[in-house]
């Protein structure tokens, strides 16, 4: 209705400028998980409230601290000073400094309440539905509209509202992608909702974390979110819906197992295009060939999304082993792996305790975004997941490895060559 | 036989039977119990501080490898639990014990033996909880112990047992003390001390006790439910049986938020004593300071769910709890403004106590303002469970509670011990702590807003958190050095500090009119109180003539407001041979024997200690039951059987010891015949 009074506006401008200066240092380049560069309408709303909170807090802070320091300096005891007069109070003053904070609180409370109701309204119809299921200590993501189940890596189309349906399989967790939205807890026996609309201009990768303490490996329960263009997202869903490429190949006698089976780690690390080219056409029963986008390209990953947790001391893997994916598939299919993991296309692999591995080869991280998904880390992970990640439910599998939960050393188990084969198989699952 | 007041060597005893270890184990003297609280809680405070230093070493750089995930989880759980239940709360209790009777002109608390019982339960509970370290089974579910993580399926070890049994033991201590102090303050004030003449610290203590007795039963219920789930197969929090985890969260925070005020209000009270004394001015707006305490406490019970904005309570609940939380800022702000107004126009002496008090005003403000920032639920969704919250409550608890408690320690150490703490070392302590805490806790605001979650034992490099964490760690080390300076000052001054005398600071309230340390009977003559500032009335009457003294109630004790005797001496003083009947404001410099004064004090007794021991033994028993259940699951039947036998021996033995000793205690008169 009316403009803000001038002095306040000036003060506001000055403080905002100071804030902008202070936060300029908090740019996303240096601080990839900052809340100060919102990329959704949700975060914009939150940030505007934060700015208002910060403005008033900074104002009160400056005034109180200035008054305190001035009083401390002005009324320090000096020699020969007479006894101070005993003042017992001043009703007018006290009413004033009761009412002024109350008025300030109104300025904060009104936009707060408005934002509460706006952000907790029902998501728009036609929103992308994503079911988030927390597990100790990894994330399951399901896209019921597309029939997709994946883990630890979330793909979101830019410009479309995504409505998360949050549940947990065990203890409490909390779902948070700082750059995209506020956090929301995953509560056992309850379903929570959270929605926002990613509006970054191009595809991007973001960090997500669990924020509710959930036990031993709480710190290791992370995930990645990729915002991609709607076209890329459609391609991705098409690819994800299809069964595992390598499984399909193996099921076909006389297909092209050689091409896929000899896919080497080095090649994969070099470029994501090459293995795609050799693998994709080898799955004739599915429209995978049409999927020109099967995942966020690893070479374009921002540095902050590449995990760098160190390999635990004492964990080694025989150097120079070359895995064979076909052999790996056979070993995998007769090992404990199938009891916990689904690989759609591999009829043996139907366990639902662990993450769905159908397109594991196109994931960029492993162990809930704890390690990069490369040959070495995967091999060590299979060999001794419990050493790689404290408390992991996935058992230690390597022969001669120490299982920290059972407190025993495995007498039998997988050899390094077998592990390398399984790793090659899993990496072939693009 | 009178001795001189200036000889603190006599400490709390006047003859041989009052010295030695036995005199401490059997003491029912509130001053000795206060000192026991002080020493014990300072010890635990250093233990909690050591845990914090290890945490900061681990987080100093990315992917720290100093401790394992399990150890880290134990460390942060025990750091929080220790600081809250074994550090700050009992530090406040040390002041409650020592000061409340002195400030209200009483000779002891209402229930001296119950008071001893409170202390022994606290000590044994603290030992019980920390004994878990020896078994490598320290609690690891966070100080908030959220179910279902703390239920058996997700925490099968004994860690959580130590936590939930230990907290129940400590709760008994807090509740017993709470009822004791409420009774004491209501019933044992000196004649003339109506409620609006009570010293500010006693007011803060009074309000705090109501918070304790109303909040602790709630967490006790939550813990009993959890105990039944873990040991006896009930399903209060069992997810598989359809339990709602929010039951725990609501119960915990209905306790947990008032607990914050239990931690901060005593510090407010101490600062409200220190600032007027060292400004040489009465507190500005005494009635408003009292009412704001009450209002904070009252509102404190209606804001608990602001700890739960992320759990999805719905917009209406979020709105209600957001707004009530904001409202708390008003009475809190009033206190800050009134402290500054108290200093305004004064003659400020920057003693160490005063520096710490000003530190509270300055640093608590930061914590208060960040508190308003997450009172707004949408903003809180970006802040909760990040380091921003860690920054907030460390400004409240270190910048507030601990600053106030240090102010209190420097201010009251002379009264406690008869000796002064070194001011020179005190100032070094203050500056190291002030710099250290700001360097440690301020960068946490930044790392939190830049996305760093709480309770993580490691973080990746390249997230933009390294610099802030490094700064926090350096700050924590500086803070640690400051605390070592304090420890040195404390220990040295106990032996060789300057002799304090009755009233080293020129303070206005009753505790300063008697010798330091006070004789065991406190007041040879119970004072008759005519104003809020009896000593100032006496020493500088020209300054207090304008004091708006209320006369309400004075007629009942037959005194005039000027402190003149209205004619009839107080009934308690009739017939004391060597005492003048007049007992208005006066200075006591001589000490007497109890016989000379004709006073009977409660007899020392070991019974409270043994009762506390029985309670602790009884609550240790479930650990053996758990052990037996673990052994049974592992197929080790003989061990399981031994475990159950131990359980029954300890449970029945402990209960028998407790009940029997309690019975014996209740049948023994408080004081024997005049000796």
Image (cartoon, coloured by chain):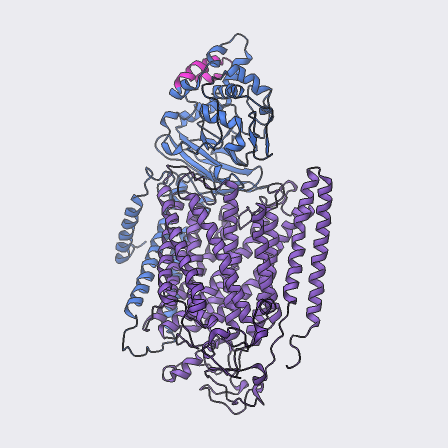
Pick whichever, A274 or B27, lies toward us.
Answer: B27
Q: Is residue B670 left or right of residue A111?
A: right
Q: How many marks?
A: 0
Q: Quadrant of residue A336?
A: top right
Q: Residue at x 51, y 90 (%)?
A: B580
- Residue B405 visible in image: yes
Q: Is residue B255 magenta?
A: no
Q: Measuring 59% from the left and 47% from the top, which residue is drawn there?
A: B160
| Image-quadrant location for residue B608 | bottom right
In this rendered view, identify the residue nearer to me: A60 or A213.
A213
Q: Which residues are magenta?
A: A273-290
Q: Position of residue B254 (x, y in %)?
A: 55, 56
Residue A127 picture location, percent across and down: 47, 34
Chain A representation colour: blue
Q: Is residue B556 left or right of residue B609?
A: left
Q: What is the x, y in percent for residue A349?
A: 58, 22
Query: Which of the chains is purple?
Result: B
Q: Is residue A221 left or right of residue B541?
A: right
- Say above or below: B618 vs B6: above
**Above/below status of B243 relative to A322:** below
Query: Nearest the camera: A413 or B464?
Result: A413
Q: Residue furthest top?
A: A254
**Res B382 seen here:** no
Kindly indicate the quadrant of the structure image that contains residue B532: bottom left
- Residue B646 in picture, x, y percent from top left: 71, 50
Q: Is the stretch drawn in magenta largely helix, strand or loop? A: helix
Residue depicted at x 32% and y 43%: A26
* A281 inside magenta stretch: yes
Q: Residue furthest bottom?
A: B567
């Amino acid at each position: 209705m009316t403009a803000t009074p001038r002095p306040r506006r000036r003060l506001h401008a000055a403080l905002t400028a100071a804030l902008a200066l202070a936060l300029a240092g908090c740019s996303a380049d240096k601080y990839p998980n900052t809340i100060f560069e919102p990329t959704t309408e949700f975060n914009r709303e939150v940030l505007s409230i934060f700015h208002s909170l910060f403005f008033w807090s900074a104002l009160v802070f400056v005034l109180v601290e200035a008054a305190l320091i001035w009083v401390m300096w002005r009324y320090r005891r000096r020699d020969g000073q007479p006894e101070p007069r005993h003042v017992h109070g001043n009703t007018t003053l006290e009413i004033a400094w009761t009412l002024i904070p109350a008025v300030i609180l109104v300025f904060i409370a009104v936009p707060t309440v408005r934002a509460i109701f706006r952000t907790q309204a029902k998501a728009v119809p036609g929103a992308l539905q994503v079911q988030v299921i927390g597990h100790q200590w990894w994330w399951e993501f399901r896209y019921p509209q597309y029939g997709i189940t994946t883990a630890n890596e979330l793909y979101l189309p830019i410009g479309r509202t995504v409505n998360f349906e949050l549940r947990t399989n065990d203890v409490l967790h909390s779902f948070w992608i700082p750059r995209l939205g506020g956090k929301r807890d995953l509560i056992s026996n309850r379903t929570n909702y959270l929605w926002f609309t990613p509006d970054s201009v191009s595809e991007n990768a973001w960090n997500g974390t669990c924020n509710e303490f959930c036990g031993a490996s709480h710190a290791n329960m992370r995930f990645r979110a990729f915002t991609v263009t709607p076209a890329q997202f459609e391609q991705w869903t098409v690819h994800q819906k299809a069964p595992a490429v390598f499984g399909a190949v193996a099921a076909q006698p006389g297909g092209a197992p050689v091409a896929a089976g000899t896919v080497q780690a080095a090649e994969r690390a070099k470029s994501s295009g090459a293995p795609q080219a050799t693998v994709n056409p080898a799955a004739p029963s599915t429209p995978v060939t049409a999927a020109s986008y099967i995942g966020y390209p690893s070479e374009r990953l921002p540095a902050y999304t590449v995990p760098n947790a160190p390999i635990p001391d004492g964990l080694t893997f025989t150097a120079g082993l070359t895995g064979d994916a076909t052999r790996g598939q056979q070993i995998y299919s007769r090992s404990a792996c199938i009891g916990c993991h689904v690989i759609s296309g591999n009829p043996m692999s139907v366990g639902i305790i662990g993450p769905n591995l159908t397109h594991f080869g196109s994931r960029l991280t492993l162990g809930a975004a704890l390690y990069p998904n490369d040959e070495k880390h995967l091999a060590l992970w299979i060999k001794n997941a419990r050493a790689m990640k404290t408390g992991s439910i996935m058992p230690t599998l390597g022969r001669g490895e120490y299982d920290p939960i059972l407190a025993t050393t495995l007498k039998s188990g997988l050899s390094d060559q077998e592990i390398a084969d399984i790793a090659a198989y899993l990496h072939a699952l693009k | 036989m009178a001795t001189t007041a200036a000889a603190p060597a006599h400490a709390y005893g006047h003859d041989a039977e009052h010295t030695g270890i036995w005199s401490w184990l059997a003491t029912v003297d509130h001053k000795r119990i206060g000192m026991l609280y002080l020493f014990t809680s300072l010890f635990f405070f250093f233990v909690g501080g050591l845990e914090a230093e290890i945490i900061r070493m681990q987080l100093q750089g990315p992917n720290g490898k100093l401790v394992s995930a399990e150890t880290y989880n134990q460390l942060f759980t025990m750091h929080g639990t220790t600081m809250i239940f074994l550090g700050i709360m009992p530090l406040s209790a040390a002041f409650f014990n020592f000061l409340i009777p002195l400030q209200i002109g009483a000779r002891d608390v209402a229930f001296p033996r119950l008071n001893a019982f409170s202390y022994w339960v606290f000590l044994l509970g603290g030992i019980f909880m920390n004994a878990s370290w020896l078994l490598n089974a320290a609690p690891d579910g966070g100080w908030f112990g959220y179910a279902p993580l703390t239920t058996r399926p997700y925490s099968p070890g004994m860690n959580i047992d130590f936590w939930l049994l230990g907290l129940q033991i400590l709760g008994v201590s807090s509740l017993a003390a709470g009822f004791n102090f409420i009774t004491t303050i209501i019933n044992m004030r000196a004649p003339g001390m109506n409620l609006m003449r009570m010293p500010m610290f006693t007011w803060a203590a009074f309000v705090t006790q109501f918070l304790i007795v109303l909040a602790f039963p709630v967490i006790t219920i939550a813990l009993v439910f959890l105990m039944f789930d873990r040991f006896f197969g009930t399903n209060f929090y069992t997810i598989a049986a359809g339990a709602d985890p929010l039951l725990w969260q609501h119960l915990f925070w209905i306790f947990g938020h008032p607990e914050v005020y239990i931690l901060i209000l005593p510090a407010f009270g101490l600062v409200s004593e220190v600032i007027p004394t060292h400004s040489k001015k009465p507190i500005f707006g005494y009635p408003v300071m009292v009412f704001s305490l009450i209002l904070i406490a009252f509102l404190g019970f209606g804001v608990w769910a602001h700890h739960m904005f992320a759990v999805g309570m719905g917009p209406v609940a979020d709105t209600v709890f957001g707004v009530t939380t904001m409202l708390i800022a008003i009475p809190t702000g009033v206190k800050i403004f009134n402290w500054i107004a108290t200093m305004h126009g004064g003659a400020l002496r920057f003693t160490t106590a005063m520096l710490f008090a000003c530190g509270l005003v300055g640093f608590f403000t930061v914590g208060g303002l960040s508190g308003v920032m997450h009172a707004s639920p949408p903003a809180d969704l970006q802040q909760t469970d990040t380091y921003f919250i860690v920054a907030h409550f460390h400004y409240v608890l270190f910048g507030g509670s601990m600053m106030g408690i240090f102010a209190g320690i420097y201010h009251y150490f002379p009264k406690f011990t008869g000796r002064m703490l070194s001011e020179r070392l005190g100032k070094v302590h203050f500056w190291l702590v002030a710099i250290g805490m700001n360097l440690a806790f301020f960068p946490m605001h930044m790392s939190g807003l830049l996305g760093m979650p709480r309770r993580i034992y490691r973080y990746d490099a390249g997230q933009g958190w390294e610099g802030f964490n490094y700064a926090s760690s350096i700050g924590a080390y500086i803070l640690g050095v400051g605390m070592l300076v304090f420890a040195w000052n404390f220990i040295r001054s106990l032996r060789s500090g300057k002799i304090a005398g009755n009233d080293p600071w020129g303070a206005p309230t009753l505790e300063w009119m008697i010798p330091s340390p006070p004789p065991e009977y406190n007041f040879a003559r119970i004072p008759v109180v005519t104003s809020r500032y009896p000593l100032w009335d006496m020493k500088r009457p020209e300054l207090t003539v304008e004091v708006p003294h209320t006369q309400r109630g004075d007629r009942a004790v037959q005194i005039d407001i000027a402190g003149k005797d209205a004619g009839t001496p107080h009934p308690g003083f009739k017939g004391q041979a060597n005492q003048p009947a007049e007992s208005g404001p006066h200075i006591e410099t001589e000490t007497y024997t109890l016989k000379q004064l004709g006073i009977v004090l409660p007899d020392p007794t070991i019974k409270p200690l043994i009762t506390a021991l029985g309670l602790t033994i009884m609550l240790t028993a479930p650990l053996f039951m758990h052990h037996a259940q673990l052994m049974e699951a592992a197929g080790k039947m003989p061990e399981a059987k031994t475990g159950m036998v131990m359980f029954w021996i300890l449970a029945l033995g402990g209960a028998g010891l407790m009940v029997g000793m309690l019975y014996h205690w209740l049948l023994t008169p408080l004081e024997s015949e005049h000796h």
